[in-house]
Amino acid sequence: MVQTAADLAGKDLPAAPVRTESSRRLRPDIVGPEIPGSPFPIYLSGDVQRGFGRGGKDLGCPTANLPDESLPPMSTVTQTGVYFGYAQVPDAAEGDNGVLPMVMSLGYNPFYGNKQLTAEIHIMHEFKSDFYGRGMKAVVLGYIRPELDYVSREGLIEDIETDKRVALKSLARPGYEQYQADSHFTTLDQQNPKL
């Protein structure tokens, strides 16, 4: 039985597999079935929090971190790893507030030795300004790969770029594209007026 991300909380983390050259070459271009299967879709929302600041500065891939309390719908049913779907920052600037493709890392970032579970979403869009403190909604639709450790920052960056390409190709199927119009993105959240 695969341990969920929540199962690992507060425990000594097992060593993540190290990314190898052969595992990189064997990565598929498209992942998942033709339509999302259980446990997907998974709906997440919360105010964007400041993270470690590594995504944009160190890796060239800015991320938006969700608060801990928004993670259980996902962390209790999935393992650590990289996922794909759609995200929206509804009250972002005009042109930045659409439903956009995203990749998401759910885990402990073994390359950096984190001890706390984080959900870091990279929305594949060039935003005009940051959106810390703003509400964000996401629909997670599939799994790309397990969380890995890396011997170099360059290897991690290379995998992140591959993750983005895999996400875009996987989302280009009708069974996934339809989620851009999901009611999650148009329904007001009674708990959070920003959403």
Image (cartoon, rainbow, N blue to C red):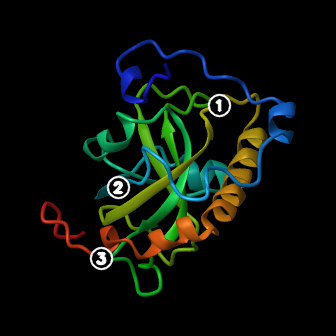
User: How far apart, in angstroms, are the residues tagged by discs 2 and 1?
Assistant: 24 Å
Q: Report the residue at 76% width, 54% height from top.
A: 29
Q: Amino acid at mark 2?
A: Tyr
Of labels 2 and 1, earlier in sequence is 2
Residue drawn at x 49%, y 55% is 141
Specify which label sits upstream in the sequence, 3 or 2: 2
Q: Position of residue 154 (x, y in %)?
A: 78, 42
Q: Which residue is mark 3?
A: 186
Whether 73 is drawn above or below 7: the answer is below
Q: Is residue 51 visible?
A: yes
The quarter of the displayed image where residue 78 is located: top left
Residue 153 location in percent, x, y?
73, 39
* Number of the label disc, if any, that sits on residue 43: 2
Q: Is residue 63 visible?
A: no
Estimate the spatial distance between the alpha carbons at disc 3 and disc 1, rounded to whole Å: 35 Å
Of badges 2 and 1, the one in the foreground is: 2
Which quadrant of the structure image shows residue 126?
bottom right
Q: Is residue 43 left or right of residue 52?
A: left
Q: Amino acid at mark 3?
A: Thr
Q: CA distance from mark 3 to mark 2?
A: 13 Å
For the residue labelled by badge 1, is the local secondary structure a helix, a strand or a loop?
loop
Q: Secondary structure at mark 2?
A: strand
Query: Which element type, helix, strand or loop, lies under badge 3?
Result: loop
Work out whether 158 lies above or below 170: above
Residue kind at label 1, given as amino acid type? Leu
Residue at which label 1 appears:
148
Camera-side residue: 149 or 99? Answer: 99
Indicate which disc, 3 or 1, sits on the residue closer to the N terminus: 1
